[in-house]
Image (spheres, coloured by chain):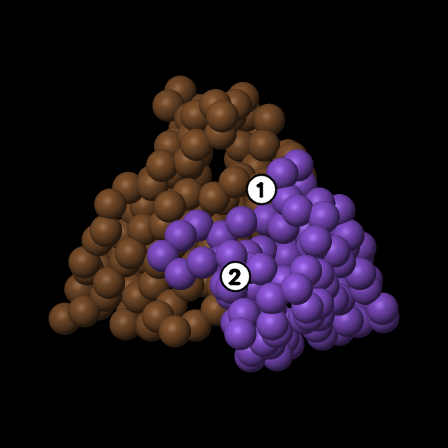
Chain colours: A purple, B brown
Amino acid sequence: QSALTQPASVSGSPGQSITISCTGTSSDVGSYNLVSWYQHHPGKAPKLMIYEVSKRPSGVSNRFSGSTSGNTASLTISGLQAEDEADYYCCSYAGSSTHVFGTGTKVTVL
Amino acid sequence: QVHLVQSGAEVKKPGASVKVSCKASGYTFTSYGFSWVRQAPGQGLEWMGWISVANGNTNYAQKLQGRVTMTTETSTSTAYMELRSLRSDDTAVYYCARNHNEFSASPLDYWGQGTLVTVSS
């Protein structure tokens, strides 16, 4: 199972919107509406930000939103804030009780 | 509130085994599944496998088949991950994470703090 493909880095100024892509295949992202996104500050535990493509867990800011199109999922962060600077990983269910993570994207707030 | 507390850092020699524990509290242990994820230095997150706490069913990443075993102990609300025949590229931070429900397809809503496993001769 190959990792989902994400851009290595994305940056934006405070207040701007950025979008992180996550490209898989017809066996994972394209087959299931079961994509999740995790925020990971180095040295801390990852945090679930989006699940089932576009749902937000309780307590997650509505500045975070998710979508899919074909084999590509996307995470959009609007109104970028300094605290959003972190690594972000997508993850898709891939069938047969398996999951696959993305390669990860470092978000920098300029 | 939900808490997952993992065991401490380990240093192992190549060929040895390691067993990492993850003690859960704040919820009904048997109503959710557990997954394990690792992150090698400078690398991304890697899904390792899943276990159903309710019935013990497991599924492991293909690359780890035969070397990894995930178990749970309901009496102490603890999940375990054992990795055998350790190699240098198994050096990583290992995370336990609770699945959002009892099903393997669900996302990981709570995570442990991570356990660093270093494999070195």
Q: Is residue B87 left or right of residue A65?
A: left
Query: Tag 1: residue type?
Result: Asp
Quarter of the image containing the C terminus of chain B? bottom left
Question: Which chain's residue wears label 1?
Answer: B
Front residue of B82/A41: it is A41
Q: Residue at x 17, y 64 (%)?
A: B13
Looking at the image, can residue A62 be seen? yes
SS category of the residue bearing label 1? strand
Name the residue at 23% across, 65% down.
B119
How many neighbours does mark 1 have within 10 angstroms: few (below 14), some (14-19), or many (20 or more)? some
Is residue A92 in sight in this rendering?
A: no
**Which sits in the foreground, B111 or A93?**
B111
- Expressed as whole percent of the image width and height from the top left, the position of residue B81 reads 39, 46
The kind of residue tagged 2 is Ala
- Residue at mark 1: B109
Indicate which label's residue lies in the foreground, 1 or 2.
Answer: 2
Q: Secondary structure at mark 2?
A: helix
How far across and down, in percent of the image, does residue A25 sit? 75, 73
